[in-house]
Amino acid sequence: MVIQQRYQTSSVTITWDELYNGAKLGDLIGVFAFKRQRQSKSKNGPRVSTLDYWSQALEWGEEGEAFKELTYRNYTRCWTIASDILQELQDNIHSRVFQSLITYIDRAGRKLTSLTVAPDLPSSLVHSLASVPTACLVTGVNMPDRDATFDSLVGLLRASVTPHVARLQSKECSTLRAAMYKMISQLIGGGGWATLEDDEEEEVVMAGPKVKRRQCTMAVLSVWYREQLSTGEEDPGHTKSPIKATQSPRKRAYPSSPRKKPFPGSPSKLSRSPVKRALSGSPSKTERDPQEVEGSPRKKIKSSIISQLPERSSKPPLVVILEDLESFHPRVLSDLVLICSEYRQAVPIVLVFGVATTPDKVHQSLSHNASACLAMEVFRAEPSTHYLTRVIEKVLMSTKLPFHLGGRPFKLLLDIFLYNDLSVENFIKGLKVCMMEHFMGHASSVLCCPAANRPALLRNVTSAQLDLVRKLPSFKTFVEAAPPKEQVALLLDDSHTKEVILSLLDKVDVWYARFCVLVKVVNALTNRIPGAPLGRQVREVLAVCLSRPLVDTEEFQEAEKGVRNMAREELLTVLQNVLDVLKEHHGEDKVLSELLNEVSLLMGRLSSMDQLTQTEEEEEEEEASADGSGGAAVTLGPSDRFRLREKLLEMAKKKPKKSSKYESLRSEVVHFLSDTFTSHLQPPTSQPLHEVLFFHSSQAVKRQLVGLPRPALTTALANPHHYLQCKCCQLEEPSSLVTSLPDLSVAYKLHLECGRLINLYDWLQAFVSVVGQEDEEDESSARSKKIDEKLQARFVLAVSELQFLGFIKPTKRKTDHVARLTWGAC
């Protein structure tokens, strides 16, 4: 085969086959290869956006493309609102823990840098200098959002305490040498005293010196820190590198090539000179609009934490974060702690351990000598379940977001979180998938927008497009329940229909706001009941209320029995919690205001109610005894216990038990709350036009979020055309066999025809008869009993792959047989 590529020499152009055959070698002087230049992407070319893949069904008639763009715009608007709330929650979720942690690191760093070593120091002070300040951050088991937590921590440390922060992971620190290189290269390479700002803005970090692996020693780090302090006091923007001073004259004469990449994590790529910023035209951080920078939620959260700390010291400490302490090798971890302790007097290092289990794991991973060198303080971060609760309350139960989840998709996302990964990040991704499915799958989602934009949107809707809203099941039910004249107007008068749609959507917004508040009321009322039938978290009550009427559930009936058995003090505490929720959210809602007033009156009656005095109880006992004396006397004999039992039962039936004042008032409270929940805690499907604002389909989301490996595997083996989309694998019937199918698919289909045990020889003969059909037509020798070695090798490979996938296994019951592990259509 002749290779078409040609190379230009100094005298003649030749091809590779000519060069291989020795042609024109006498004329050959030299061959020079040139790299092909990279073709830069044209900036003026068409940009591909998500709108190009927006598969909104064109059900809107001739103006389908315009409404397709409107649904995409509504989606982007809704997701922007949700992402802003989530960003603020992400920065605020660990604010308390981060505030105490950063305060501890700052205090420990100031104490270390202020101490000086002198020969007349007492032994206790020398021992304190040998102790490395350590913060143990307990993040909790199965916390997949660990990276986001440590990213926020690093950003706050660089902004408030020190710019020199190193992050170590166990997968990068298998040996002590690798751990020292990662730590020292990140500390020195961070150079300068610049601070890292928000991720939304451009990061401006001064580039540090390049560090080689053989230079990563604690002696070099101490020299660098000493010179860094001296240069930092003179000129904070200039960094003098002690690395270059330690190099040999040969290395100084021949510096390293600029083409070499800096060490991992080096911020040199982020640095931009003022000249480049001026030429590029992009404003620097100091030239931006102060309102734009100060208005971001992350900036506010960060400034609130930094404002409570003293000013940054001129001698900042060096912070080393070990994210996954349990995964580090104990020997590497112990040696690293001992080395940091030995150089404690020259380099102020503060350690931060990320622990997933318990703080005792630190002492189990370290040797006794290394544990004695640590002065550790424990900080506990909130678990991901608390973070999820805040996400649900601030995003899914918020009136700012017009999009809402129905019962089935919310239960699906909740089950994936609780039983699969405990990752809030994956829960948010699932929410985004639900939002996309809602806007792409329903044409009526064009009305799912903030209330202020609905009037202008409805004015541009035509009668044909308005008929799609009329076809919604909930709107049909609303029309059927209306008077006859109103039905005619709703079906024929477009202007009247638009006004009704607008009012209905506004009512749904008001209803959902009240619905979320009452869900919190139910949680405050029932979370202290023994056994917690409705759960102890708001998300559990919300999942029940979104799916079916609350009062009709067995869980609520059990909770109601628990409330009926509460004592007076306990009932007052529960009602106070309910009152706090109503005071926080009642706002302008008349129903919630009336509920607040009624609960306040009931609490006042409970508080002012006097218990029965001892004299009243004695009077009741006297009345009971008087009533008992009027009856016939019962004379007891040796065997009259049965008569006594019957007589007492008759007396109990005749005299009804009198309920106390507290019991009657408690029953009144329970009846009032039950009636309120019956009226206002119905599922969203009871509201007209709920399809516009609520997403109820869980199957579409389940196909994308929940992996089904077994059906996907059987589909790929039985019908490869489903995934390959090639004509050679296309089947007329699912059970048919084609010669062009992959060997694995042929072996799989043949094994479905067998029983419990499969004879390998018979299986091979059937495989050869299917795969070798083309050879049999051309060659008569293939009809012989001898099997081609290539076909046999292909069969062995297919059988091995089926065994690896778990469809068959070897067996000793019969020779040359394998056991089948699946049955039926599997």
Image (cartoon, helix red, strand yellow):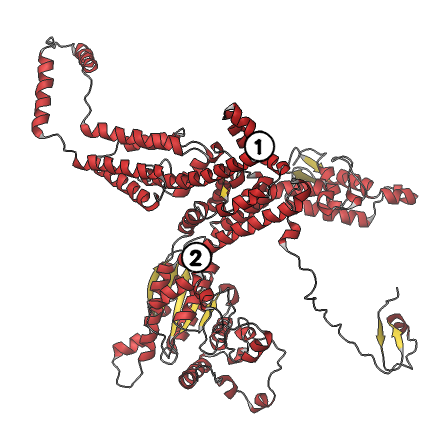
Rendering coords of residue 458 (x, y %): 56, 42
Q: Earlier in the sequence, mark 1 or mark 2?
A: 2
Q: Which residue is mark 1?
A: 493
Q: Is residue 653 above or below residue 130?
A: above
Query: Could you say which disc has been placed on residue 88 in the image?
Result: 2
Query: Label 2 is placed on what type of residue?
Result: Glu
Q: Residue at x 69, y 65 (%)?
A: 44
Question: In the image, what residue type sits under mark 1?
Answer: Asp
Q: Quadrant of the N terminus?
A: bottom right
Q: Is residue 189 above or below residue 251?
A: above
Q: Quadrant of residue 636?
A: top left
Residue 364 shown left or right of residue 145 in the figure = left
Q: In terms of secondary structure, where does tag 1 sit?
A: loop
Q: Is residue 480 left or right of residue 675?
A: right
- Can residue 423 be seen here? The reply is no
Q: Position of residue 215 (x, y in %)?
A: 51, 81
Residue 517 is drawn in which quadrant?
top left
Relative side of 694 to 112, left or right: right
